[in-house]
Image: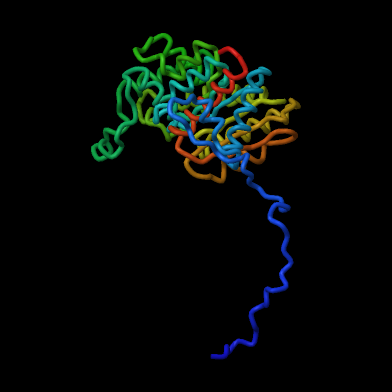
Amino acid sequence: MASKYSISPLDLDGLDTYPLASRKSKVGREQLGKPSVSGGRFRDFWDGLPDILAARELRDLVTRMQSARARERALVWGLGAHVIKVGLSPLLVELMSSGFLSGLALNGAGIIHDFELAMVGQTSEEVADGLSDGKFGMAEETGTLLNEAIRTGASRDIGLGEAVGAMLEEKDPPYKETSLLWNAHRLAIPVTVHVAVGTDIIHMHPQASGEAIGKTSLHDFKLFAGVVKGLNDGGVYLNVGSAVLLPEVFLKAVSVVRNLGHPLSDFSTANFDFIRHYRPRVNVVQRPITGNGKGFEFVGHHELMLPLLAAALTAERESKGIGG
């Protein structure tokens, strides 16, 4: 049956082709992954990853972090509280001890989960179970001790992060070894806490002081700007699991540092989260980068991605014969 269309299919017989081997291609056999072998080391697994897309990018980030450590440039981590909730504190403590974390920024929920794990070895209540009768967020020690620490910090003119670290050192909790704040205080690593008032359970308790929270958190913003200043010429900033608050804080700190005339270029940033968010992408990965810096974006579960990153940093360090 003849077609009703007035346009006929093109005749492809005259197509101009070329030899496959002459074409420039994006993937070559030397980039392919290698299967893991039974009893192999992590280094074998790492070297066996494909040299393509996210695997290539992660290798690049590890190299930049290794360089920052060797050159004593800042390695700053901004963490959403979920990172602590999924059990990654021991890995981050090890990164503190081995020089891959020189500054730590948290939101208000971060100090809560860190405190509870240090004090009683558990955290993260079932919200729905307590919400119906108003018991959600009403743990006595969490509300009382953290608010007391913040008020004490305000009276001593120190930041919120340092105040909670000092309180944990004084209380000597039974599970302190896995506490980010206790270990950072022990190692004199700056911890800053950036609070949105009303978002954290301790704000519901009568001991909460808006004046103290505001004073200590503003102190920490200024301290964070001082930490960010150290990223210049080879440092690395990682935003892990914070979709809005810490990307906004980071961008403002970058602007403050540059406005005051301090050099801040040629550093790298990375965002790790479950999905791609607009604000971390533009405020962390794209906007602050200048010169030879680079922004990275990795999508995946924190409880899988961060152990991979930590193990890669250790493997890279060992392969170069660098001590902890």
Q: Left or right: where does residue 146 sit relative to residue 251? A: left
Q: Say which residue appears at 53% left-offset and 28% top-offset.
A: 44
Residue 110 coordinates in the image, percent (x, y): 44, 27
Q: In terms of depth relative to the viewer, which is nearer, 6 or 102?
A: 6
Count of marks placed on residues: 0
Quadrant housing residue 198: top left
Quadrant housing residue 126: top left
Q: Left or right: where does residue 140 sit relative to residue 80? A: left
Q: Say which residue appears at 33% left-offset and 20% top-offset.
A: 121
- Can residue 1 be seen here? yes
- Can residue 154 be seen here? no
Residue 210 coordinates in the image, percent (x, y): 46, 27
Quadrant housing residue 303: top left
Q: Most extreme residue toward the left, as rendered?
A: 133
Q: In terms of depth relative to the viewer, which is nearer, 75 or 300?
A: 300
Q: Say which residue appears at 68% left-offset and 33% top-offset.
A: 255
Q: Is residue 203 above or below residue 149?
A: below
Residue 304 coordinates in the image, percent (x, y): 45, 33
Q: Is residue 20 above or below residue 268?
A: below
Q: Quick one: quadrant of the C terminus?
A: top right
Q: In terms of depth relative to the viewer, which is nearer, 146 or 268?
A: 268
